[in-house]
Every structure is written in structure tokens, then in C-alpha cells.
């Protein structure tokens, strides 16, 4: 079974690890068979499962429901769960909502934001709840950004992101997740912190990679982000099976053949 200690050991050894989003029992079992290291029950479920235009309508009850479904059938992966939009604005809400998803089967809770989350991260850590802090393109703030855009492109925003990551780790964050940032910035953050860093659209130098399951199976409306690769139709997935796609993704991340330069932002 993969734990935070496993991921910390992988970081020290320079061994890459895989993460996929997952929302139900059957896919969770296939991910177990494919040895995927980490599962994220992402609030992306609002878009890929529920059909909303953003992650904002997702509730803590939705997250707990999908977490329990996944946790019941996958005993291998470290399970991370998003606290959804506006569910961790006050300390009281954050603690109650973190308890709900931890009791549903999460091992780590994921929250979006910068250094302003330091107090919360420290409180949760002290209460036995490790956090993954999501920086860069944080989809819950889509209305602040004015769209899903690459972040950290200017020197100022890159420095802020790097400092946020350092502050959050100093406060007790167990994992950093970087979404849609230039590869050079992700490399700098990965070198600067002593906890595992997971990237999506963040280049090949992070310790781990994550993709939304539907994207890497080619289950999209046709328009895909530049960092997405379809592992289902990849010719190396000789069985052309979903489980084969998960295994190929895991292997490609481990050996460093995914992501390539073509998948990254400069
Ligand atoms: O909710 C989600 O699926 C995520 C990933 C895009 C990292 O946060």
C-alpha cells in the first residue's frame, strides 16, 4: 500500500509516481490492478461526472459519496480528496469537512490556494489530517482568473508561487500539486521543497504526475489541453483496454516517457 512515507521515499530516490483522478469503484479496482500509486477524488467530478461547467457546484456530500465508492475497492493507492469550493473558508467548516472526507476513506485532503492557507494546513496536520496544497491554475478560482489559464508566467507571479509553496510546506503541507505552470517554475518548486510535488501541465520534473481519468482515456468533447495524452488508443496499449491504459500511464510516468516537452508550457 502506498502511503505518504512511500512517496517521500520515492522523492529521495528520484523515483517518479503516478496519480489519476477516480470517482467510482470499478475504475478504482482497475487502477489498483494497474498499480497506480495515488488516486485523487477530484472536484473535477462536477464537470466529468455531473456535467457542470465548473467545479463550483460540487458539495462535501458529493465528495464523501465518491470517496467512499473509491476507497471501498482500492486498497493500494494513497487516496487524496478535494475539499470543494467554499468548504474551507472558515476553520470550523474546514475541520468539519475534512473530518467528513477522512471518515469516508481519504488519506489526504487537497485544498486550493496560497500562503493564506498556512494556519489551516497547520491545524489540520496537528489534528491528524495531511494536506495537499494545489497551486497555479486552481479551478475553484476560475472566476477570479477569468478562465482556465496558465499561471506563474511573470517573474512576480512565479516568485509568489514559489514562496507560497515554501510557506505551506513549512506550515506542514504534505504534498504540493501544481497545475498549468511553466515547466521551469515547477522544476524550481520541486527542488525547493522536501515533500512530493505532483504536476499536471507542469512539465516532467515534478516528482509525480496527475491526469483526469476521462482525459487520458480520450473521453472528452474533442478539445483537450496540450498536456493530455490518450493512453487508451496509444499503440503500446496492445490490449486496447482501460486497465491497459492505466498501466501504460503508470509505466510512462515511472520511466519518464510521459510527459514530453510537447506537453509542457514554457
Ligand atoms: O479536481 C481535479 O481533478 C484536480 C486535478 C485537475 C488536479 O484538481
Image (cartoon, grey):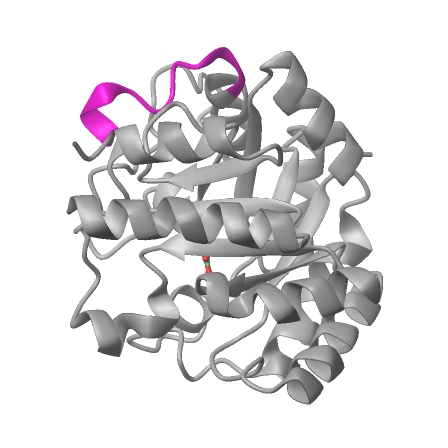
- Residue nearest the observer in this picture, 113 or 159: 159
Whole-percent x and y of residue 20? Answer: 53, 43
Q: Give the side of residue 194 with respect to residue 244, left or right.
A: right
- Residue nearest the observer in this picture, 72 or 173: 173
Q: Give the side of residue 104 with respect to residue 141, left or right.
A: right
Q: Where 223 falls versus 11 (above or below)?
A: below
Question: From which residue to which does the magenta span run?
Answer: 254-263
Whole-percent x and y of residue 154? Answer: 15, 47
Q: Give the side of residue 101 with respect to residue 41, left or right.
A: right
- Residue nearest the observer in this picture, 103 or 159: 159
Whole-percent x and y of residue 33? Answer: 70, 31
Work out which quarter of the rendered image holds the C terminus and state it: top left
Magenta region includes residue 38: no
Q: Residue 93 lies in what quarter of the image?
A: bottom right
Q: Residue at x 21, y 61 (%)?
A: 148
Magenta region includes residue 262: yes
Whole-percent x and y of residue 197? Answer: 52, 37
Q: Where 263 falls versus 170 (above or below)?
A: above
Q: Where 138 falls versus 183 (above or below)?
A: below
Q: Residue at x 38, y 22 (%)?
A: 258
Amino acid at each position: 500500500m502506498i502511503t505518504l512515507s512511500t512517496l517521500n521515499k520515492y522523492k529521495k530516490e528520484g523515483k517518479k509516481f503516478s496519480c489519476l483522478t477516480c470517482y467510482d469503484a470499478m475504475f478504482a479496482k482497475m487502477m489498483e490492478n494497474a498499480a497506480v500509486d495515488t488516486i485523487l477524488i477530484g472536484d473535477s467530478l462536477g464537470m466529468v461526472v455531473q456535467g457542470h461547467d465548473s467545479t463550483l457546484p460540487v458539495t462535501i456530500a458529493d465528495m464523501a459519496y465518491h470517496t467512499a465508492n473509491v476507497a471501498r475497492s482500492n486498497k493500494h493507492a494513497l487516496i487524496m480528496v478535494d475539499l470543494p469550493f467554499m468548504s474551507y473558508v472558515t476553520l470550523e467548516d474546514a475541520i468539519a469537512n475534512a473530518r467528513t472526507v477522512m471518515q469516508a476513506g481519504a488519506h489526504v485532503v487537497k485544498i486550493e490556494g496560497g500562503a493564506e492557507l498556512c494556519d489551516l494546513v497547520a491545524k489540520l496536520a496537528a489534528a491528524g489530517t495531511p494536506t495537499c496544497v494545489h497551486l497555479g491554475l486552481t479551478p475553484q478560482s476560475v472566476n477570479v482568473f477569468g478562465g482556465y489559464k496558465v499561471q506563474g508566467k511573470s517573474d512576480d507571479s512565479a516568485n509568489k508561487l514559489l514562496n507560497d509553496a515554501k510557506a505551506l510546506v513549512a506550515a506542514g503541507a504534505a504534498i504540493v500539486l501544481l497545475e498549468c505552470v511553466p515547466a521551469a517554475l515547477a522544476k524550481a518548486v520541486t527542488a525547493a521543497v522536501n515533500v512530493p510535488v505532483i504536476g499536471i501541465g507542469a512539465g516532467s520534473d515534478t516528482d509525480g504526475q496527475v491526469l483526469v481519468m476521462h482525459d487520458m482515456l480520450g473521453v472528452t468533447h474533442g478539445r483537450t489541453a496540450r498536456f493530455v495524452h490518450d493512453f487508451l488508443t496509444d499503440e503500446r496499449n496492445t490490449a486496447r483496454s482501460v486497465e491497459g491504459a492505466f498501466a501504460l500511464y503508470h509505466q510512462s510516468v515511472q520511466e519518464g516517457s510521459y510527459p514530453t516537452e510537447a506537453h509542457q508550457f514554457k
